[in-house]
Image: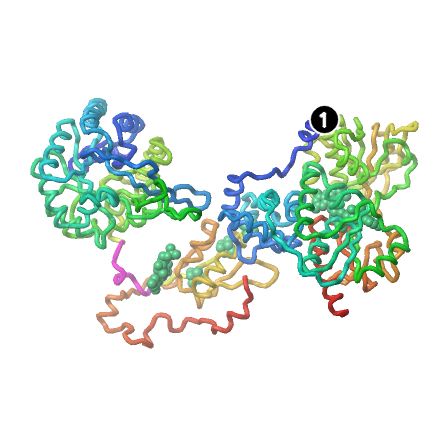
Amino acid sequence: MAEFSRPQSEEAFEKNFAQIKPLMNETQAYYESSRCLFCYEAPCVNACPTGIDIPLFIRQINTGNALGAAKTIYDANYFGNACGKVCPTEVLCEGACVYIHQDVKAIEIGRLQSFATTKAIVDHEQLFTPGADNGKKVAVIGAGPAGISCACELRLKGYVVDIYEAKEKPSGLTIYGVAPYKIRNEEVLTEVDYLKRQLGFHINYNHPIDSKEIVEQLEEDYGAIFLGIGLGETNNIELPGEDLENCLGAVEYIEALRMRHHEVGFGNKVVVLGAGNTAMDAASESARMGAEKVVLAYRRSKEQMRAYEFEYDLAKSVGVKGLFNVSPIEIVGDGKVEGVKFIRTKNENGKLTTVPNSEFLEPCDMVIRATGQSKLVEFLSNIQGLELDNLDRIKVNYKNYQTTNAQYFAGGDAVNGGVEVVNAVAEGKIAALGIDKFLMSNE
Amino acid sequence: MADLSINFAGIKAPNPFWLASAPPTNSGYQVMKAFDQGWGGAVWKTLGVPVVNVSSRYGGMNYRESRMVGFNNIELITDRPLKDNLKEIEEVKKHFPDHAVIASLMVESREEWHQIIRDCENAGADGLELNFGCPHGMCERGMGSAVGQEPEVLKTIVSWVKEVAQTPVIVKLTPNITDVTEPAVAAKEGNGDAISLINTIQSLMGVDLDNFVCYPNVDGASTNGGYCGPAVKPIALNMIKSCAQHPDVNLPISGIGGIENWRDAVEHILLGAGCVQVCTAVMHYGFGIIREMIPGIDRYMDEKGFKTIDEMVGKALPNTKTWENLNLKYKVVADINEDKCIQCQLCYIACEDGAHQAIGLPDEDSRVPYIIEENCVGCNLCAIVCPVEGCITMERKDDGSQSITWKERTAKGDIPTTFNDPLAGGIGHWIPEPIEALKKGKK
Ligand SMILES: Cc1cc2nc3c(=O)[nH]c(=O)nc-3n(C[C@H](O)[C@H](O)[C@H](O)COP(=O)(O)OP(=O)(O)OC[C@H]3O[C@@H](n4cnc5c(N)ncnc54)[C@H](O)[C@@H]3O)c2cc1C
Ligand SMILES: Cc1cc2nc3c(=O)[nH]c(=O)nc-3n(C[C@H](O)[C@H](O)[C@H](O)COP(=O)(O)O)c2cc1C
Ligand code: SF4
Ligand code: SF4
Ligand code: SF4
């Protein structure tokens, strides 16, 4: 395949990971915004988890009021810029655009959204001012999209908000997880900075909340606590050979890639285990890192993949090969990964069974396990009375995202099990409104 | 292949597509190029005592991504010496003896008229067009539309012209007048051979919101100009129709205004134009648009069985009546084709807020609106706003056996005459109570 040569420099990395939704220029934005029909009760709005008034902001762009458009966007979604780039718009707003019914290309809502918000960010447009200090404090654990969205909304209402973040950068998986061809690191950071400058929440970096004592201290110091902790490391798959060098978890590999770009380790022949969106990303990214061969191996059939179709298409477009109905039985190698032993599977009356004597070896020098992220069960056990559901997701009341411990609210991946940035943003905001009601009624 | 050649008021041309007197006919170079590309005639940029123009002369009216749906100018007549123009007319005629070259003229005194007519005819002009239309600049000096707006003056000048003219005389009319047939009749009474219309419409193209100066900006100031381009076609068509139907006009008409393609041209012809003139479309796209116009009209004529242009002239006139002669028994009702509908609900909100509350929205499971037949007055609005061609059609509901016009009802005394007359047309139309509006919610 070798469609991409291995990037040796930052420029080469940028080229291999060129943005799939590049920033629109004025003319593109003008033309594209002209096409919007200004639908009544527009279905695109209903498809947006944050309910952005899409026809309105597109019309504002079209009338030369991009800053007004940015305000419309940010009023609904504090990650308006990032969401325009990283949202799976094909299955959200753009997937609902009425043009689809006519086999006409949907309005490029995501790119228009990034266009308007970029303008506001570059212009340092002041869209928000914090509410007058109401004397109350809220702690937010996790500076991911859920946490930051919650913090922004609380600042509008006059709360002092302290965010505690284990890592050294804000925005959670937006910077540590999302594929680099969707958004650049500095774009993510600039938006958070933009919000922070206007709204003035505090982020304490490298500050994991990791013991019962600290948790209790927070409970004492703050009226309410928001849990925006996301998910944990990649799940183990309990296979022989999993500890070999170059057998990596997808989330960990991607984090390294996002932080170190072309300097990250790479494989020439990569096997990715799994068929979710993260698997698609890891496979695409390996290909763009110059791997000669990338195989995406999945136990079940192609039709049963959890990944969005467009994500699989994107992976295929950079040369990734799908290998379906194969189950890994062992990762082989002498100290270092040398291959994966698979056995073929088939669907028998709705049950997945292995095909006897169908074992084969797929040689490779890197294995990426995209087998889902673990839940942060251990940490959560520090919080008294906090219940999890049968999938270890934090239980909440969906009206206000309050947990079973009244002082705690939660949102994002830790609650929904791992969806998208936009869902985390939406939930963080609803939780903030819940916190406000909770603290105000506790007067 | 139909015969496209025409004999317009004695002026012969290979086809009915002429360039209007304007910048595209400024020079022999341009006219020669246009003829070479297929244009049948050209009305030379208006000749007279050469003027001095301002710099910054045009304004454009865009509609969303469509540029120049309207166009205006504050230019005057030719700024080139007469002798240069005459020399070039002569040269063009030498190369294109069968094409129509019309000299457009605007001067003041009888002597000037006589002299310039002789000069132009000596140079080989096939006809003369008297510019009584220009609505800016020249009219301040008592020429152009200042003449066109005064039928008596117009008649006098036409008769001066006719004293010496050997070639046919076309009188170009201004639309900046209450009843265009008045100057048309005056042209006839002055012995003019034809009329052409419309010239541009007085306009201001818009205001620069930053410096409060209208477009086009001439050193911090602007002035009203002449409006033309696609947006003026409906006005032109109506005026052409009025002249064509007026019993005392009875002159060949050269149709001008908003013509950009063969369809526009055919519309002018069907309402009474014997040839057409084009300016803005050429200023926008160049002479090359003739490539589309000739085969377009040719195919249309073949399909409809027209052998000559003359056979088409005025074909739509018998069907263009005064309001009082329309059939009040004719009844159409909107019909939505559910398979074509893309569910934008623009028809719903248009009828709901802008017409007769005759469209309903279905429950949850569908977004395809439906027509409430009892309320539908058959206004066409929904069919006009619907973005899908042929999705909303207006279906005839009366059986066609009955006809009564306002005129006939008036004769019978069967019309509403008092404020609360039971004969009012709206009686029986269901309209919701005003207070119902407040239950609808904002959108
Ligand atoms: C590989 C990958 C690709 C993705 N691609 C996309 C995409 O293209 N588009 C999209 O919309 N979504 C994508 N997602 C999903 C998206 O990134 C998440 O849904 C979203 O980031 C969830 O936000 P969150 O705030 O709930 O959690 P996170 O983003 O995970 O943020 C949680 C934060 O909390 C911190 N934290 C956790 N525990 C503690 C603690 N005890 N103390 C202090 N801090 C703590 C973490 O360090 C982290 O910064 C992707 C996810 C992955 C894994
Ligand atoms: C269907 C229709 C009916 C109208 N009826 C009236 C009327 O009853 N009284 C009136 O003063 N103008 C009437 N107008 C003219 C409008 O008030 C307005 O002057 C004109 O449409 C130009 O504005 P616009 O470009 O925003 O449409 C009517 C216009 C339309 C389209
Ligand atoms: S559905 Fe498409 S056309 Fe309609 S408002 Fe939304 S973006 Fe515009
Ligand atoms: S034709 Fe007019 S009244 Fe009838 S449904 Fe359409 S918009 Fe409403
Ligand atoms: S305007 Fe046309 S496409 Fe839109 S909802 Fe109505 S019928 Fe359907």
User: Which residue occupies 74% across, 38% down?
Assistant: A280
Q: Residue flagged by tag 1: what amino acid is it?
A: Ser
Q: Which residue is mark 1?
A: A9
- The reply to whether residue B198 is visible in this rendering is no
Q: Position of B304 compared to A323: left or right?
A: left
Disc 1 C-beta below 8 A from ligand 1 = no
The magenta stretch is B320-330
Q: Is residue B305 above or below residue B363?
A: above
Q: How is the image coloured?
A: rainbow
Q: Quadrant of the C terminus of chain A?
A: bottom right
The chain containing the residue under callout 1 comes to A
User: Which residue occupies 69% across, 40% down?
Assistant: A311
From the top left corner, tell me how far across and down residue A218 is, in percent: 84, 57
Q: Quadrant of the N terminus of chain A?
A: top right
Please tell me in which quarter of the rendered image ligand 4 is found.
bottom left
Q: Position of A228 compared to B154: left or right?
A: right
In the image, residue B9 lies in the stretch drawn in magenta: no
From the top left corner, tell me how far across and down residue B151 is, in percent: 15, 50
Q: Nearer the viewer, residue B204 or B400?
A: B204
User: Which residue occupies 58% across, 44% down?
Assistant: A123
Q: Position of B41 compared to A150: left or right?
A: left
Say few, some or many: other residues with alpha carbon within 10 Å of mark 1 (under 14 / 14 to 19 / 20 or more).
Answer: few
- Disc 1 element: loop
From the top left corner, tell me how far across and down residue B216 is, in percent: 36, 42
Q: Residue furthest left?
A: B163
The part of the image, by quadrant, that contains residue A309 is: top right
Chief SS of the magenta region = loop
Q: Position of A318 compared to A141: left or right?
A: left
From the top left corner, tell me how far across and down residue A408 is, in percent: 81, 60
Q: Nearer the viewer, residue A95 or A73?
A: A73
Q: Is residue A108 above or below residue A268?
A: below
- The reply to whether residue B348 is visible in this rendering is yes
